Image (tube, rainbow, N blue to C red):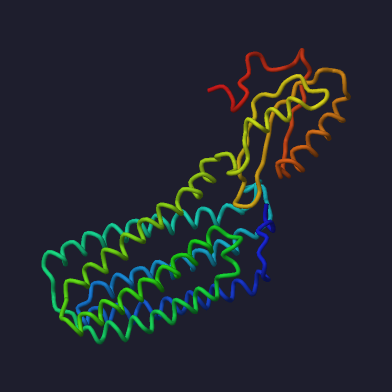
Amino acid sequence: MAGHHHHHIDPQAGDTRVALAVGANLALTLAQIVAGVAAGSLALIADAMHNLSDALALGIAFAARRIGRRPADATMTFGYGRAEVVAALINYTTLIVIAVWLLSEGVMRLVTPEPVAGWIVVIVAGIALVVDVATVALTWAMARSSVNIRAAFLHNLSDAMASVGVIVAGSLILLYGWHWLDAVVTLAIAGYILWQSLAGLAPVARILMLASPEGVDTAEVLDAMRSAPGVSGVHHLHLWRMDEHEAALEAHVVLSGEVPAEEVRLALRDLLRERFGLKHTTLQIESAESACPEARAIGHPT
């Protein structure tokens, strides 16, 4: 599985980009927390927490990318490709916790608004916007082929939008003294983080739960295999993703006896590869006499 990530840029160059993005986000987070405390702005601290989560996400992604390139061994016979999927799960879970905390803090601040130094908010949020845009540029190319980097990319993109919101809130506080707007922006940022995290968590959970690949109809796969020459039945079929990019299938195939077993196996291998994009297949060939009794078509008996 290692080596099947299909990144569009050199892995080492990609690692360098991720490392630069981590450093930029950590520096920005520290600056935003200090400024948020000094200005009394919860929205700025909320944006800082989001940036911190991005830095952590990128840091975990950096480690997962390197781990994921390891070859299979006696301990991890499927390889380490799922390291990035596990990292994405950690990142999204952390974001959900942060979003819930920010929602509670935002509601409390909305009930009891506190003075906010709008000029500090505007200046620091402007700097944050520049860093977020730079991070988006660093990770854009890799985001197209990695669920882990894509999560970090989307986080930084939302950070850029959040920074715009904070700038607008700070400006309105300076102009009209609407200190309650700081809490409203905090709630908006937290809501967006929560929505984005829950949406990103779904495909990650599908991979870890060994769900069938999206875009592949299991019933259609079964019908195609059963219709192949020399096949009288297919059962105990399992269809799942080994990692983000590679799907796998295993099944028991019952022969009709009209076509040699090896010919049937090769024909099914080519069918599954060419029609469904399944490059990793394991087929157990059975005769009518040795076929599993009362076998389920999908899955195995519980």
Q: Nearer the viewer, residue 180 or 105?
A: 180
In the rendered image of this protein, does residue 51 appear above or below residue 202? Answer: below
Q: Is residue 188 above or below residue 272?
A: below
- Residue nearest the observer in this picture, 123 or 294: 123
The image shows residue 33 at horizontal and vertical percentages of 29, 77
User: Residue 245 appears at what percent x and percent y?
Assistant: 64, 52
* Vertical comparison of 93 with 42: above or below: above
Instruction: From the top left corner, tell me how far across and down residue 47 is, in percent.
Output: 33, 72
Q: Does 249 sit left or right of 86 as displayed? A: right
Residue 294, image quadrant: top right
Residue 274, position as x, y percentages in the image: 77, 43
Question: Could you tell whether 80 is left or right of 205 in the image?
Answer: right
Residue at 19% in and 78% down? 40
- The image quarter in which residue 132 lies: bottom left
Q: Is residue 236 above or below residue 278?
A: above
- Identify the residue at the far left of this view: 112
| Residue lying at 75% horizontally and 15% vertically, measured from the top left | 290
How many numbered dots are placed on residues in this image? 0
Q: Which residue is drawn at the image coordinates 38% and 70% (left, top)?
A: 52
Instruction: Decide if residue 249 is on the left or right side of residue 201.
Output: right
Q: Nearer the viewer, residue 74 or 289?
A: 289
Of 144 and 63, which appears nearest the observer? 144
